[in-house]
Amino acid sequence: MKRTTLFFALLAMTAGAMAQSANGGISPAMMQQMQNGYQHNAADKALRNVLVNNSPAKMAQNFDNATRFNTHFSNRVESKAITDQKSSGRCWMFTGLNVLRNQAIRKHNLPADFQFSQAYLFFYDQLEKSNLFLQAVIDTYRKPMSDQEVDWLFQNPLSDGGQFTGVANLVSKYGLVPGDVMPETYNTNNTSSISGLLKLKLREDGIMLREMAAQKGMTDKKLQEKKTEMLTTIYRMLALTMGEPPATFSWTQKDAKGEIVETATYTPMSFYEKFAKTNFDDYYMVMNDPTREYYKVYEIQYDRHVYDGQNWRYLNLPMEDIAPMCIASLKDSTMMYFSCDVGKFLDRDRGLLDMNNFDYESLMGTTFGMDKRQRVASHASGSSHAMTLCAVDLDSEGKPVKWMVENSWGSSYGWQGNLIMTNEWFNEYMFRVVLNKKYIPANLQAMLNQKPIMLPAWDPMFAPEE
């Protein structure tokens, strides 16, 4: 090749590489820089040989943090038998019912292993959510399928996840029954199969309702009749896989020693009113979302389990306002519904949530420096799991050192079925807690009367807890 030809060929290659880089692609020069950044030395080779055969989490375990674990708590509400949600996303239900259960056991001297039936409430949760979806489809039929609200509805016709609002709405409407009156089934413990069938049917029904609603002369009465027919099929599918909820039942009450107190006949509502009657209007959810303005109330569209219920409202507060209220509740022996990003820095063997459990920075030779606001804004963190806040350990100045939650993953998981979290972790990955208003200072209670700022259902901060 002639020298001039070679020169122009190299010039063209350089120009092409520069053009590719300018357009956002990876140029040869960029690739060379990246390859040069990987040191082919003995340390990198040894680290690679370990990591290709192991989980980064396992290799990043911080040995220096191994002794930072104790189970003493200065203030603890004694939890009872640990529950197990199995392979289901019902943490929100187990958590809410665990709060009510603890109160019922203490008030009525019930056995420590007493439980309310999660299967009973889940049946109505799935039926009500199905109605919520179908009615929302009718309400939005004039909007195109490409509309974000309609698209979100068909993406999320049903789920087994939820919020504390679900417990409040469902219990107030349908009451409660003891666990042995409507026990768990395979499909309540393992929800994926039946959930897939229900969602498939609901999407089919949703399309049919949209087509019907668009017909000339269609009346709301006909649409409601068709919706009821569709829900009848859903009811049958639920009854076949979960059992049918009882209208009345006979139940023998025993005391903490196992002695019989009485045998009586109840309806689910009369049982609830006797053993767990709660004024849910006294409970408020506060959250810590640093991406939004504090001291404002937010409401989430479709953040309810019952169509004719209320969307739950949240007061957004800084952590320094939330922690004292949680401490006040625990000092008064009152557990709380609590949610967090449970998978972050979780040592599953010890049941410890600690920012120092894993040293990924030393392992990978880089930093992971986002703060809580940046993690939420970039979808790197958000509330994923609900548990029951039951303990806090305070130092000599009354400041929290660590917290503990009663989990619903069985008694063999974590520390005796509980998870312990350092206060640093609590501040970084706790998102919501439900408090009785008597633990909320008057100035914050007044803020709850604000007109809420409506947020869309697809807001990433408010995905249902599982």
Image: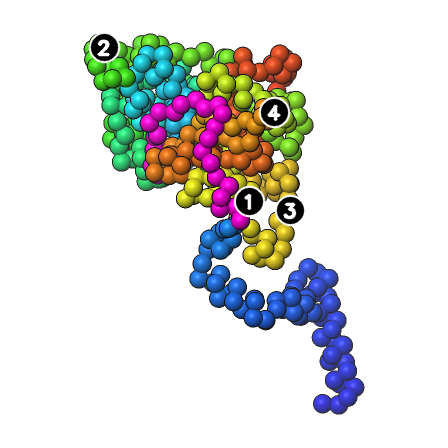
- Residue sitting at x 39%, y 11%: 277
Residue type at mark 1: give it.
Asn
Q: Are marks 3 and 2 in contact (CB under 8 Å)?
A: no
Mark 2: few, some, or many residues within 10 Å (few <14, many ≥20)? few
Considering the numbered disc 4 on the image, is that residue within a helix, a strand or a loop? loop
Farthest residue, direction right:
4
Gap in Å between the C-alphas at discs 1 and 3? Answer: 14 Å
Residue at the disc numbered 3: 369
Give the number of the mark in front: 2 or 4.
Answer: 4
Q: Would you say residue 255 is visible in this rendering?
A: yes
Considering the numbered disc 3 on the image, is that residue within a helix, a strand or a loop? loop
Q: From this view, report whether residue 244 is shown above or below residue 342.
A: above
Residue type at mark 3: give it.
Gly
Residue type at mark 2: give it.
Val
Q: Where is residue 230 shown, x and y percent of the image?
A: 34, 27
- Residue sitting at x 27%, y 30%: 184
Q: Where is residue 205 shown, x and y percent of the image?
A: 38, 32
Residue at the disc numbered 2: 261
Label 4 or label 3, whichever comes before in sequence order: 3
Which segment did they paint magenta?
64-87
Give the quarter of the image for residue 390: top left
Q: Would you say residue 205 is visible in this rendering?
A: no
